[in-house]
Image (cartoon, rainbow, N blue to C red):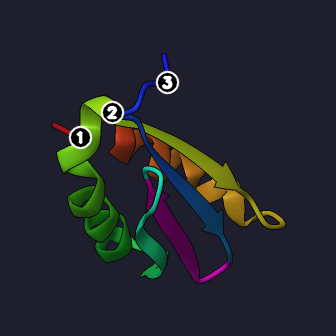
Amino acid sequence: MISQSTYFCGVDVAKDSFVASMKNGRFLVKNKIFSMDRIGFSELERMLSPFRQEIVVGMEPTGIYHNNRTCLASLLTKLP
């Protein structure tokens, strides 16, 4: 259920990086670039973990690069 306390994170996936923005009525993070590796996924995890119970994440894949979504989905299900 979407409520006033729901946060939204959009992720655009490319070959070597992914870009994420997060908002709740206003942008909290806008167009932050992450590397497409363990470091980038860890940085995203740190950004999202405080909002774990209240976040909806959407992803826009580009070409075949969305195959890394498995890593991203795995990360998101393991957030504390």
Q: Which residues are magenta?
A: 15-23
Viewer-nearest residue: 16 or 12: 12
Residue under pointer 1: 79
Where disc 1 sits, the SS reads loop
Q: Which residue matches tag 2?
A: 54
Q: Is residue 64 above or below residue 30?
A: above
Please state which amino acid type lies under the numbered disc 2. Glu
| The stretch drawn in magenta includes residue 70 | no
- In this view, 57 is above or below 6: below
| x and y, in percent, of residue 2 in the image | 49, 24
Q: Amino acid at mark 1?
A: Leu
Q: CA distance from mark 2 to mark 3?
A: 9 Å
Q: Residue at x 45, y 57 (%)?
A: 23
- In magenta stretch: residue 20: yes
Q: Residues within 10 Å of mark 2 (few under 14, many from 20)?
A: some
Give the mark nearer the N terminus: 1 vs 2.
2
**Disc nearest the viewer among 3 and 1:** 3
Is label 2 or label 3 in front? 3
